[in-house]
C-alpha cells in the first residue's frame, strides 16, 4: 500500500512537470530594444557637410562618442525579440571640422549623400 502511494506521488509530480513545461511556450515574452532606433529612411536623410546639430536632429544622440576624437560618433541599435531572434545594426559617423564627412555601417547611403543640402 505504501509503495502505491509513492508511485502515485511520483506520477503526479511527473505529470505536473510535463504539463508545466508544455505551458512555457505559451508565455508571452516582450521585445527588448536597446540603443538608437534607426531606419533606412533616417540614414537616407544624411548628406555630406551636415553640421553635428543636423546629424543629431536626424539620428538622435549617439550611443557613444570617441573619448579621444569628438569627430566620431557611434550609433547602435539592437532588439532581442521575445521569440529568441536578435537584430543588430550599427552606424559610425565621421566629421571633419564639425561637418559630416563619412558614414560607415549596416545601412546603405542614398545616392544624394555626396550632394550637400545647400546645393
Image: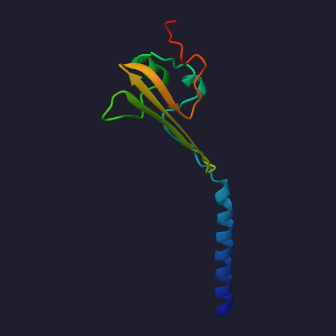
Residue drawn at point x = 55 percent, y = 23 percent? 42
- Residue at image point 45% right, 16% down: 50
Q: Position of residue 107 (x, y in %)?
A: 57, 31
**Which residue is at the front of the view, 21 or 41?**
41
Q: Position of residue 6 (x, y in %)?
A: 64, 87
- Identify the residue at horizontal 45%, vertical 26% (top origin): 60
Q: Which sits in the foreground, 95 or 63?
A: 95
Q: Quadrant of residue 115?
A: top right
Q: How many marks overall?
A: 0
Decide which of 56, 51 is in the foreground and name it: 51
Display colour scheme: rainbow
Residue 5, placed above or below residue 34:
below
Farthest top residue in view: 119
Residue 93 sits in which quadrant? top left
Going by the image, does 98 lie left or right of 35? left
Task: Please state which of residues 111 and 45 is positioned toward the viewer in this rendering.
Answer: 111
For image coordinates 67% across by 60% down, the residue present is 23
Depicted 104 relative to depicted 8: above or below: above
Report the quarter where the N terminus lies.
Answer: bottom right
Q: From this viewpoint, which residue is outermost toward the left? A: 68
The picture places residue 118, in percent across and down from the top left corner, at 49, 7
Give left or right: position of 76 versus 53: right
94 lies left or right of 5: left
Amino acid at each position: 500500500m505504501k509503495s502505491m502511494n509513492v508511485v502515485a506521488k511520483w506520477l503526479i509530480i511527473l505529470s505536473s512537470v510535463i504539463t508545466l513545461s508544455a505551458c512555457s511556450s505559451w508565455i508571452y515574452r516582450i521585445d527588448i530594444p536597446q540603443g538608437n532606433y534607426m531606419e533606412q529612411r533616417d540614414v537616407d536623410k544624411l548628406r555630406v557637410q551636415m553640421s553635428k546639430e543636423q546629424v543629431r536632429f536626424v539620428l538622435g544622440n549617439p550611443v557613444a562618442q570617441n573619448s579621444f576624437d569628438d569627430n566620431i560618433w557611434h550609433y547602435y541599435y539592437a532588439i532581442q525579440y521575445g521569440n529568441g531572434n536578435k537584430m543588430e545594426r550599427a552606424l559610425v559617423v565621421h566629421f571633419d571640422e564639425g561637418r559630416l564627412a563619412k558614414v560607415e555601417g549596416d545601412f546603405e547611403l542614398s545616392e544624394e549623400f555626396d550632394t550637400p543640402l545647400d546645393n
